[in-house]
Image (spheres, rainbow, N blue to C red):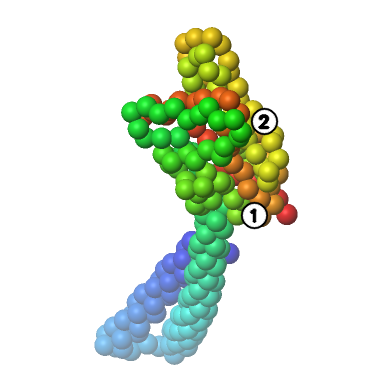
Amino acid sequence: MTEQELKTNISEVRMKALVCILLLLETFVFVVQQQVDGGLNEKERPDIYKALRELTATVTEQKENIRALETQLRNEMKKKDEEISNLTLSQVELRKENRDREIAFSAALTQSNGENIGPFPTEVTLTYKNVFTNIGNAYNPITGVFTAPLKGAYMFRISVFGYGPNPAGACIYKNGEKLVIAFANQPQRELNSSNGVVLILEVGDVVYVRLYPNTKIYDSYNNHSTFSGYLLFTLI
């Protein structure tokens, strides 16, 4: 039985009890009036007293019903309060768990008016210092390295920008292994390229970007060259 149904039943029982009390009072007044007017004959007296006893018993019964329903309602409300309290605790724990799984970052190479990086004869790890987002603090802007805090599937993307005649290129690495490259080459004007990859990472795995040998990339406050990543879902 729902809380509203219990309240409705209590109201109905109380109404019935009130009606019985009114009838009991009406009968009592009738008896008193008859006694004042000259008394009751022997045939009338037993019937009226019997009615009084029956009404009194009914009122007593209705009072017991009200007490029982009120007790039931209190128990139901207490149970609901406990359920709400347990639900609230579960929601708090779920929100905390979800916050622990919120991992995402995005950064550009520089905040300067304009800066070229490279070319170098060998690969160089890039540090993306202009951080837009770093939820979970898994990306280190000092080293340029992302370290996986949870086992899961992660998405990573890079974009590179430059000017010819120098080619522009950068590679995504996982634990020292080269995975994908974004590369562009033409004799003049702007160069741009991008690439991405979904990786399964264990806790402690690292992902970073290296400038491709003998290439040059450019960045400015317009944020042409970027490195981003986020957790898609966790794995057991």
| Image quarter of the N terminus | bottom right
Residue type pointed to by label 1: Gly
Q: Secondary structure at mark 2?
A: strand
Q: Provide the residue designation for mark 1.
A: 204
Task: Looking at this view, name the residue that lies furthest to the left.
Answer: 36
Q: Is residue 188 visible?
A: yes
Q: Is residue 62 visible?
A: no
Position of 7 relative to 34 (above/below) = above
Q: Compare residues 34 and 28 and report the one nearer the observer.
A: 28
| Circles 2, 1 touching at the beta carbon (< 8 Å) | no
Where is residue 230 shown, x and y percent of the image?
A: 57, 42
Residue at the (46%, 66%) spot, across then down: 7
Left or right placement of residue 111 versus residue 75 in this view: left
Q: Provide the residue designation for mark 2.
A: 180
Task: Looking at this view, name the residue that lies furthest to the right.
Answer: 236
Q: Compare residues 156 and 209 and report the one nearer the observer.
A: 209
